[in-house]
Amino acid sequence: MTLIKSISGIRGTIGGIAGNGLTPIDVVKFTAAYGSWVIAKTNNKKIVLGRDARISGEMVNNLVIGTLQGLGIEVIDLGLSTTPTVEVAVPLEKAGGGIILTASHNPKQWNALKLLNGKGEFISDADGKEVLDLAERADFDFADVNELGKVVVNDTYLQKHIDAILALPLVDVEAIKTANFKIAIDCVNSTGGIFVPALLKALGVKTIHELFCEPNGEFPHNPEPLPENLTEIAKVVQGKNADLGIVVDPDVDRLCFVCEDGSMFGEEYTLVAVADYVLKHTPGNTVSNLSSTRALRDVTEKAGGTYNAAAVGEVNVVNKMKETNAIIGGEGNGGIIYPELHYGRDALVGIALFLTHLAKFGKSISLLRSSYPNYHISKNKITLTPEMDIDALLLKVQEKYKNQPSSTIDGLKIEFDNEWVHLRRSNTEPIIRIYSEAQNETVAEGLASKIISDIKEILKLN
């Protein structure tokens, strides 16, 4: 059983002993801490709540609602929803914050509380520490019987979210409609199965081949949208002669595409393609995290803009976007952040912008992919053990490569001309991630192997 408390929220496996997993006691404790923090911070007793379709969602939802009511907080319950939809709803409801119940790409035994501020953005690291401190001290003041919070069920935000996307100047519904796309979708039996077809129909797409669109939480494959998990939709795209495939994760904040021949567009290139389209019409700057492909920098600089890198984590990317007035940003895991709509990863707005781009491009999705600089990222990891001193380890790796440009804003990133390697501790799993990128797979894998060998040698010497 696992319970992880981080900038990404309170994430854990369902069941087990309190404090070792996301048990009902843990759900209540952290919800009470967050609700108390919202009241103290904003003097606003309204919180928006939504969830993905995972099996534990209803149970966790009931616990969260009851706890917030017990604090005297009014709960706007969106029911089955998406992370970006809750983010859109928080400011529209003038709420003090929001909670999304989702463990994102984690398997079905996981769930989590993702915590938002009054702007509908993820709470900061400092705010997160305050919430964790409140939880640790159990410093809660519950309301008396006459002051209990009420629950308002609101199912209007699916349409409100779609309407907001359709109203964006760079979303061209007529162009998408005229392109007459045939699209296959894989929504991993979560809430994308409700939201993605509704969006596509609103965009004028008539032929939609739905795969795993029943929101029952029974994930038919590992829900992380990586190539090895997308063999079924690749077959459907080819078998149905579809123009492309669209894949989202369980809470619909990550997005990737499948080309017409069944090959992967590459989740790293979701942001690259959408940014390319946005930059063509709105000159400006871009941001992604340190572990994302260099191709975004290439596309940005070609368009006359400036690219900046942020530490991994959506809140860090958002902060850097605000600091640099970026017009688009996100993460290489298929996360699109388009501030014209809101500051949060949003697969739905990504779909609308991408389809507009593809319609105006006028050629196949594989030809669009071939128009971008081609890099390969190798993703590796080392499982952490209690005796590992990660900070000391990274310092020794940095010393070994002291003649190379490096960044330590998030772990250690070392630059080698057009190649790089990034080592960082995961926020959501007990591992150290090792990402490397080069212009071909062999070089990227070789770079990763060299760094892993260096790490093993350092650990052996210790």
Image (cartoon, rainbow, N blue to C red):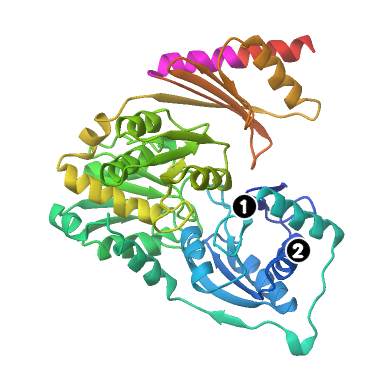
In-image side of 100 versus 20 (left or right): left
Secondary structure at numbered mark 2: helix
In-image side of 31 versus 153 (left or right): right
Q: Residue at x 76, y 90 (%)?
A: 146
Residue 396 appears in view: yes
> Residue 14 in the image: x percent, y percent?
68, 55
205 is higher (above) or lower (below) than 223: below
Q: Residue at x 30, y 54 (%)?
A: 352
- Magenta stretch in the rendered image: 439-451
Task: Tell which of 276 and 108 is nearer to you.
Answer: 276
Secondary structure at numbered mark 1: loop
Label annotation for residue 109: 1
454 is higher (above) or lower (below) than 125: above
Q: Residues within 10 Å of mark 1 (few under 14, many from 20)?
A: some
Q: What is the quadrant of the C terminus in the image?
A: top right
Q: Residue at x 24, y 46 (%)?
A: 357
What amino acid is found at the position of numbered circle 1 in the picture?
Gln
1 is higher (above) or lower (below) than 172: above
